């Protein structure tokens, strides 16, 4: 009999150094838990995240990708997150069209003071990914072992 | 081939309680590229750092991964450790297994697995790290202060006092700003001129300070430590270095119709004028729009009477260029215009005035010689009504959404000064809230109510209109819940304040950011309140947000300290994590330049050897001293020519791969 493997989603969270990464640190020092499926990659600004990184993540089998930056108007580099917002709106609707559902991608603004928000956002996002299940659409077979 | 060392920290039990640190170290030992891996109680301690240093030497490590607390905590520490052991400090990567792992996961199995993935991601990244050398740039040891109000004067005095050269550019013919127009100042009620004019004189006499009055900043180039600024010296038609300020010209000038700006247009002045008796510099200036000689080539009287021969009707604007290491913004504020507030009849009724106008009327050197009179007929008023929050805390869009902060206090001041000098005058104040936080401030306001019997009415005013010789104020008393129709002789409007209209232009020249109200934004609202996010730009006074004089002076001093910290350096270390364009790939499209918030990208025509084809192409060149490393350009670049050192495409992709494995 075949044992069904338990679904353990792979979730990549890009966090800008100045706000969201610090927000994640605050969630940590406040001991506000969120699932271990979330792995954070630190980038200087949300605008450093090239859409290609997100495509790559899905190709490699990620089940969700979330991008966090400073609140609009608060970007450490003044305007970075405005570019992020526009780029990601485009990318996410394109991904949705390709079959990577909107629920698998998300942009959130989390400030350095919003530890609670960081943890809530991650909990919600992960719950959504569990609901959607494994991402099969973009996964590149050559990347799978 | 990289030789990587992995160092897993227990952080006492902070990490070790929910992450099996030994297992992490063991697993990492077997990863390709890793030649050494260990764990220790406190990696950041001297003993822990010694382990790292020894391993670097012993195993000839080319890079290290430290699995520990957040890089925001100890990245700098471990970079220094690496450097001490002879390793390039940028060959260090941190896996955050405390804040983002051990502290949030309770299950040790889960925590350990995640820690291993995070360590692998850091390893994948460090394998692609390249040694980076922080650049250096020089510092011009001279500061520029834009705006010569109390903020600018104080910053300049403090900078000069430490021995550095500083120039003040002031657009008006004299320094002094709004404070020079005030009569007495809260909360001590000392005379404004008595405390300000000595400072103005100090600024003029200080040999380290150069004043460029009647001047404006035209253009700013360069970056922190190396600004190049073009200053326009507007034509005064009077030779500044020759004029003695005797004032003979003002006595003779027949053109007397110019509005006296210093008295806010409450009276007239001659075409050639010195703004006020204590003006610095004490030099005349000709208002070309009023001068008969300049307009019609007649008259010329001032030239005849000037014993010093200082008049020059043909003077032109001059431009000078100067180098600066740091720039202080001190452009201050103005009361808002009242054209959207017709309900107060300000434009029609001379007896409806603003608070700043009242300052001039109360001032002995003002248009009425300091006598409180109705501007309409020169009569003594018996009843005065103040209206607070005119245009402040206004979300209708007509005014300003913020609290102007100083109006509650100066209205209490005005009310008290009037009651003190003219006990027969009844004083009423309409207010929304009275806000008086500050040392001795609430006591000050209570004195107005308790000792001086000023009648404070909580409520807004809907309308002010003239009726015969009087004014009628229509409002509500919110506490008594009744309508008020009050007959009064004078109405004083505590108008909202806003940043100087030039602030936006100056900010964009400096690439300093401003908020939706045009106040200059600070680098951090709490921790870096006097710096702009743009390196080398500092903020002083009301240009950053509403403030009274004590706060302005404190901030001016703080800005000066930051300037001095910068000027006292011989070299500036620049962040090496900057963008770089690959000349072979760049097509010179300018997309990157458009998104760079710091103007860090320029273009050069370069001779490129593209696989044997030699041609001159326009390519993007990043100024490393200006680039702050946000990465906006890297994503925008359609040819994939731009990459960010320290966060390269390959590095981030490698992290993604490691996490998704
Ligand atoms: C009616 C009234 C009463 C007040 N009473 C008190 C009081 O009793 N006590 C108290 O503590 N505070 C009082 N204040 C507040 C006080 O006036 C301010 O705190 C203080 O003047 C702020 O100084 P500043 O240098 O920041 O701005 P400002 O005084 O506005 O100075 C700015 C200077 O910069 C110049 N400038 C602007 N733009 C440029 C440019 N682009 N290039 C060159 N120069 C430029 C301006 O010409 C000006 O000289 C009062 C304010 C008002 C309106
Ligand atoms: S990384 Fe940011 S600051 Fe640097 S050149 Fe690119 S856009 Fe400008
Ligand atoms: S966006 Fe890319 S191709 Fe265009 S100028 Fe900049 S570096 Fe060159
Ligand atoms: S630095 Fe946080 S979004 Fe730009």
Image (cartoon, coloured by chain):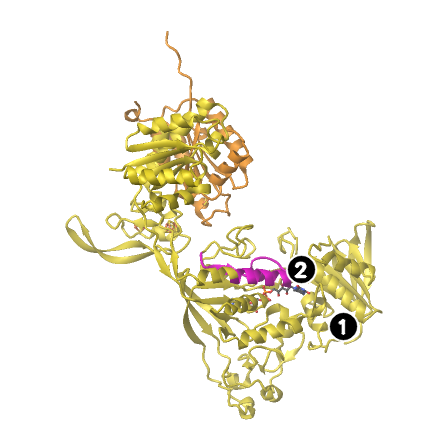
Chain colours: A orange, B yellow
The N terminus of chain B: image quadrant: top left
Beta carbon of the mark 2 residue lies under 8 A of ligand 1: yes
Chain of the residue on which disc 1 is drawn: B
Residue A5 picture quarter: top left
Residue A138, percent from left and from top = 34, 27
Quick check: marks 1 and 2 in contact, CB under 8 Å? no
Q: Which residue occupies the foreground of this view, B50 or B315?
A: B50
Q: Residue at x 30, y 36 (%)?
A: B4
Q: CA distance from mark 1 to mark 2?
A: 25 Å
The residue furthest top is A1
Residue B30 lies, with reference to residue B147, above or below; the image says above
Residue A135 lies, with reference to residue B450, above or below; the image says above
Residue B83, percent from left and from top = 35, 46
Can residue B192 be seen here? The reply is yes
Question: Which residues are the magenta region?
Answer: B535-560
Q: Which residue is mark 1?
A: B374
The numbered mark, 1 or 2, whose residue comes first in the sequence reads 1
Q: Which residue is mark 2?
A: B406
Label 2: state its secondary structure: loop
Q: Which residue occupies the foreground of this view, B534 or B9?
A: B9
Can residue A57 be seen here? The reply is no
């Amino acid at each position: 009999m075949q044992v069904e493997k338990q679904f353990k989603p792979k979730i990549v969270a890009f966090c800008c150094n100045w706000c969201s990464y610090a927000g994640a640190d605050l969630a940590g020092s406040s001991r506000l838990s969120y699932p271990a499926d979330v792995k954070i990659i630190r980038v200087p600004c949300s605008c450093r995240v090239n859409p290609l990184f997100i495509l790559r993540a899905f190709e490699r089998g990620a089940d969700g990708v979330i991008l966090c930056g400073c609140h609009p108007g608060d970007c450490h580099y003044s305007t970075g997150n405005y570019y992020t917002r526009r780029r990601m709106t485009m990318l996410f609707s394109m991904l949705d069209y390709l079959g990577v559902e909107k629920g698998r991608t998300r942009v959130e603004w989390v400030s350095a003071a919003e530890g609670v928000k960081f943890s809530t956002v991650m909990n919600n996002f992960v719950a959504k990914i569990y609901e959607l299940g494994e991402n099969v659409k973009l996964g590149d077979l050559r990347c799978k072992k | 081939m990289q030789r990587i060392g992995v160092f897993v920290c227990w952080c006492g039990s902070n990490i070790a309680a929910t992450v099996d640190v030994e297992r992490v170290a063991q697993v990492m030992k077997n990863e390709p590229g890793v030649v050494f891996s260990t764990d220790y109680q406190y990696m950041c301690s001297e003993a822990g750092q010694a382990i790292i240093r020894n391993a670097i030497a012993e195993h000839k490590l080319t890079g290290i991964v430290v699995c520990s607390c957040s890089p925001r905590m100890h990245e700098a520490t471990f970079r220094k450790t690496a450097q001490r052991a002879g390793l390039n400090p940028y060959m260090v990567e941190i896996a955050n297994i405390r804040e983002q792992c051990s502290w949030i996961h309770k299950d040790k199995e889960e925590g350990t697995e995640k820690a291993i993935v995070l360590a692998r991601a850091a390893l994948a990244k460090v394998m692609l790290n390249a040694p980076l050398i922080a650049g250096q740039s020089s510092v011009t040891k001279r500061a520029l202060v834009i705006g010569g109000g109390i903020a600018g004067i104080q910053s300049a005095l403090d900078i000069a006092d430490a021995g550095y050269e500083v120039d003040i550019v002031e657009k008006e013919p004299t320094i002094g700003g709004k404070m020079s127009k005030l009569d007495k100042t809260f909360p001590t009620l000392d005379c404004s001129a008595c405390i300000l004019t000595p400072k103005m004189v100090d600024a003029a006499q200080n040999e380290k300070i150069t004043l460029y009055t009647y001047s404006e900043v035209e253009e700013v180039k360069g970056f922190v430590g190396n600004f190049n600024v073009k200053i326009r010296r507007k034509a005064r038609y009077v030779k500044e270095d020759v004029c003695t300020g005797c004032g003979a010209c003002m006595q003779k000038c027949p053109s007397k119709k110019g509005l006296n700006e210093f008295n806010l247009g409450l009276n007239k002045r001659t075409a050639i004028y010195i703004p006020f008796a204590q003006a610095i510099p004490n030099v005349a200036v000709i208002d070309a729009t009023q001068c008969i000689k300049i307009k019609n080539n007649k008259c010329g009287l001032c030239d005849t009477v000037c014993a010093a021969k200082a008049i020059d009707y043909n003077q032109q604007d001059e431009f000078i260029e100067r180098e600066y290491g740091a720039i202080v913004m001190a452009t201050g504020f103005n009361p808002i215009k009242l054209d959207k507030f017709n309900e107060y009849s300000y434009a029609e009724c001379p007896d409806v005035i603003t608070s700043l106008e009242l300052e001039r009327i109360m001032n002995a050197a003002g248009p009425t010689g300091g006598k409180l009179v109705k501007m309409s007929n020169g009569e003594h008023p018996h009843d005065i009504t103040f209206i607070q929050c005119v245009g402040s805390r206004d979300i209708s869009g007509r005014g300003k959404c913020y609290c102007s902060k100083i109006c509650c206090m100066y209205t209490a001041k005005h009310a008290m000064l009037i009651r003190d000098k003219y006990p027969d005058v009844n004083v009423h104040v309409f207010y929304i809230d009275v806000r008086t936080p500050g040392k001795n401030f609430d006591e000050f306001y209570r004195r107005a109510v308790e000792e001086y019997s000023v009648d404070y009415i909580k409520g807004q005013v809907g309308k002010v209109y003239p009726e015969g010789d009087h004014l009628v104020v229509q409002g509500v008393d919110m506490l008594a819940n009744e309508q008020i129709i009050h007959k009064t002789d004078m109405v004083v409007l505590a108008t909202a304040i806003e940043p100087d209209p030039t602030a936006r232009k100056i900010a964009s020249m400096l690439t300093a950011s401003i908020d939706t109200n045009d106040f200059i934004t600070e680098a951090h609202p709490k921790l870096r309140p006097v710096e702009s996010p743009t390196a080398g730009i500092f903020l002083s006074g009301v240009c950053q947000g509403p403030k009274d004089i004590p706060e302005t002076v404190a901030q001016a001093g703080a800005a000066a300290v930051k300037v001095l910290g910068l000027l006292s350096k011989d070299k500036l270390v620049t962040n090496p994590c900057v963008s770089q364009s690959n000349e072979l790939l760049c097509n010179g499209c300018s997309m990157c330049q458009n998104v760079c918030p710091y103007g860090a990208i320029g273009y050069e025509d370069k001779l490129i050897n593209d696989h044997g084809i030699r041609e001159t192409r326009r390519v993007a060149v990043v100024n490393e001293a200006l680039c702050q490393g946000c990465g906006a350009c890297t994503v925008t670049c359609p040819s994939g020519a731009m990459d960010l050192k320290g966060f390269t495409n390959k590095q981030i992709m490698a992290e993604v791969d490691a996490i998704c494995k």
